[in-house]
Image: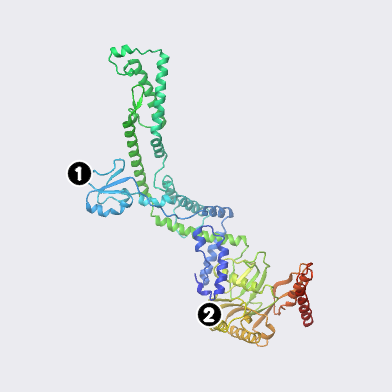
Amino acid sequence: MKMSILKTSDARAVHKEVSEIIRRYIITKKARENFSLNLLGDAKDILAMHEKILKYSRIDNAVIDKIRENLNSFELKKAGDFFVNRTVIVPDDEAYERYIWIKKYCDLMVSNNNNEGFDEKQHLIIANSDTPVEEILPEFFIINFAANKETIKKIYDIYSLLWDCNIETNTNVDTEKLKEISDIIAYINKKCEINTEEISRKKALIKNFKYIIEQHKEKINSEILKDVEKRGMKIDVKELLMKNLQSISQIPEVSQIINASVENHIAEIVNDFNISKAKIVSVFEKDYPVQTDENEINKFLDETNREILETEYEYKVKAAKKLIKFEFIECLCENIYSLDEILGIVKFMKDNNAVMPKISNTLLFKGAKNLLISNSVDVSYSLGGDLERRKIAMLTGANSGGKTTLLKTILHIQILAQSGIPVCAEYCEFPVVNEIYFLSKHTGTLSAGAFESTLKAIAKILISGNKKIVLMDELEAITEPGAAAKMISAIFEILTENDNFAVIVTHLSDEILKYVSKDVRVDGIEATGLDENLNLIVDRQPKFNKIGKSTPELIVERLYRLNAADDKRTEKAEGEIYKRIFEKMKKQV
């Protein structure tokens, strides 16, 4: 940002205030934190900013609202650490050294004759020395995409909305590619786990399989008893002993019942969970009471887990090969943050009926509002131009009449305009300047050292040959009135010698006018009385070529009348003081 244009700390403080107002219209955290009005020194850059803002301002308000809705919670997240249940076996020590960095994410080992030393439940990858990393550790390429899939979906939605409005962006964005990326990562969670319908079903089956089998076992045994009772079968113990049978399940009729019930429930499980019958055919021991075979159950679970790992791995490898470099997503995010700024400015413009200012050699605005005052009175003002060529003005008038407010309004407009941003006015022209100076009003008495440093700062303003705007508020506060009038008149004289724009607020107009030329215009803001609530009645629109009386007697009258209206009259003596001062000032007026 060209803060070098803002030459004083007071000017920079106002710049910060104005930037904060625009910042409130920006939605994303990063764009909001990084935003600051960028004063531009080249008219071409300002016009380019105008064109950019106007381009986006033509978008339908409903579309802008949809885009801004997508900006809520928009941020690029940093992927967390991950570790996958995988062992990568490489052929030799050289390959091991090449891939050693992946040990942070999975197990790595050099091949031996039997490939011993790894967990059989892990996914096993046999790699060569030239196996692409995306086939060894695809998660490394997709983890950032997975962590930001909501953000990528928002990017796709935003660019689709812009594309539908025929808005060209700085980046050549392939929305179809963004859609493909969004679809690919839709089934990948933040831990790089795949949750397609098939894999999710298998994971749920693994989690609940032992419980499911146990439930079916209870049902099988209950059905066997009911079937035996239904058939009126009686078990003869003597017959069991004579035939040397160790279990009733060895009785053909009973065995038939057991087999039928087990087969029915295996078929039900196969049908419910879409699994191969061969994988679970032996999970029930066909005896009575029917028991489960833990070895067969664990075998099924291990096989299914390996299937899941392999399916996930294949999905991830395909995804890693299809996904673009994540740096492109980062670039798109930066573009989105810039878009957020522009749409924030557009929102500011529409909410405040702001207009695009015109570059000229005139400082002119009509119906301008002060950004920091709610329900502020619209004012118009100009320096230079066809109607009033003079660019140097002395601003005079009533205390609390709005002189300082006008100075800040001028500064607000110049900061916004020179940043290429619409201004809160009905019409505006502004000059592109190299330097902006603002000296706010000092309170209290300056020490000799402070007075000297202030004079040095003023001297630097005056010796600069660059095109500039100078705004000073009641310089007389830095020294005694007689000397101040002569000092300010000298400042006016020097300012008129160059192509400068300047407004200096002062209460010493009568004294200063004795020393300045006609190149200095006198503007006045006047208070005309007190209203029924004893508030000052002020015409805040400055009058050109007219001294504005400061009318301090109105302030004294207000205090006197407020005190007189106080029923308690707790400060009677104070009221008498106001009365005597007011009567004395009326005689002088």
* Quadrant in the picture for the C terminus: bottom right
Q: Which of marks 2 and 1 is nearer the N terminus?
A: 1
Residue behind mark 2: 466
- Secondary structure category for the residue under label 2: loop
Residue 346 lies, in percent from the top left, at: 57, 60
- Reply above or below: 51 against 204: below
Snapshot quadrant of residue 355:
bottom right
Residue 11 lies, in percent from the top left, at: 56, 73
Badges 2 and 1: C-beta atoms under 8 Å apart? no
Q: Disc 2 and disc 1: Cα gap in Å?
A: 82 Å
Judged left or right of residue 143, residue 444 is right
How many residues crowd around disc 1 within 10 Å: few (fewer than 14), some, or many (20 or more)? few
> What residue is at 42 percent from the left and 15 percent from the top?
229
Residue behind mark 1: 113
Q: Is any part of residue 353 visible from this angle?
A: yes
Q: Nearer the viewer, residue 391 or 48?
A: 391
Snapshot quadrant of residue 298:
top left
Judged left or right of residue 302, residue 188 is right
Residue 561 lies, in percent from the top left, at: 78, 71
How many residues crowd around disc 2 within 10 Å: few (fewer than 14), some, or many (20 or more)? some
Q: Which kind of residue does numbered mark 1 sit on? A: Asn
Residue 119 lies, in percent from the top left, at: 29, 42
Q: Which kind of residue does numbered mark 2 sit on? A: Asn
